[in-house]
Amino acid sequence: MNCPVQLPSPATSRVLLCVRDGDLRADIVVELSARPGLVLAAPADDVHHLVHRARGWRADVVVLDLTIAELEVAEVSRLLTDPAADHRPRPLLLAGDGQDDVVVAAIRAGARGAVPRSSPTREIGDAVCAVAGTGAYLGAPLTRRVLDRLTAPGRELAEVFPRLTRREREVVRYLAKGMSNAEIARETALTLRTVKYHVSGILRKLDCRTRAQAAARVGAAADFPLPVAKLQERAG
């Protein structure tokens, strides 16, 4: 499907899909193509250039499949909705079972809603239209679980992640703020080598492959406020 060559009217909303499953993507395209006021871009296959493409095409809604971007979805949501950007597309998540933590972290980071991937395409279309209208949308199966997490009082890191040592809990708070290892070393008066050792331990104990994934998990599970951060790993 090619990007439309005509410029959308002011009442038109541009939608960019980033959905892995070809059959699901095709069904969503059929559904959205029948909705007045929506213009679709050629679907994106991955998230690596998604932010640049969404802003370059000035997409209004980005439908983001969590089976593609679970490890980066919170960071992508922050970048898409960064207040400093001249155009801020609105992320809508397609969530699978067991991804509540990811959904919560992404909504805190700026995503405008989520709908189960197993939902009828009509509901996915309704969600896109709601978000395109500068609103928000949570699919019924997600509503109570996600809202309970978003409104629950924050919990201490020691309660949520009992395997982390006191020093690791201190380091992970700075890591979650997007600080590099060198910045963490300055804040904690630790050597750079010691910080790297603690970061490695944190990733192992949280079963995370990247610093970004660890930050998202801490933010979702412990209600820890995460600021807008850069997508790249800041390990230096």
Image (tube, rainbow, N blue to C red):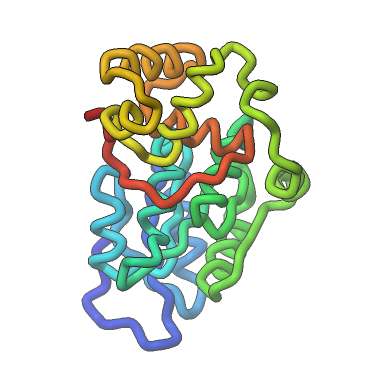
Nearer the observer, 20 or 29: 20
Q: Residue 19 at what x, y percent from top left?
A: 41, 46
Quadrant location of residue 127? bottom right
Nearer the observer, 140 or 25: 140
Which quadrant, please, contains the N terminus?
A: bottom left
The residue furthest bottom is 10
Nearer the observer, 85 or 136: 85
Give the residue drawn at x 34%, y 37%.
Answer: 179
Give the residue drawn at x 45%, y 17%.
Answer: 202
Q: Residue 189 at what x, y percent from top left?
A: 36, 24
Number of callouts:
0
Q: Residue 44 at what x, y percent from top left?
A: 30, 50
Quadrant location of residue 186? top left
Position of 153 compared to 60: left or right?
right
Say if 3 sits above or below 50 in the image: below
Which quadrant, please, contains the C terminus?
A: top left
Say if 35 sits above or below 219 in the image: below
| Residue 23 visible | no
Position of 83 compared to 149: left or right?
left
| Residue 211 visible | yes
Give the residue drawn at x 43%, y 43%.
Answer: 73
Q: Residue 191 at what x, y percent from top left?
A: 29, 18
Give the residue drawn at x 61%, y 20%.
Answer: 161
Say if 216 sits above or below 143 in the image: above
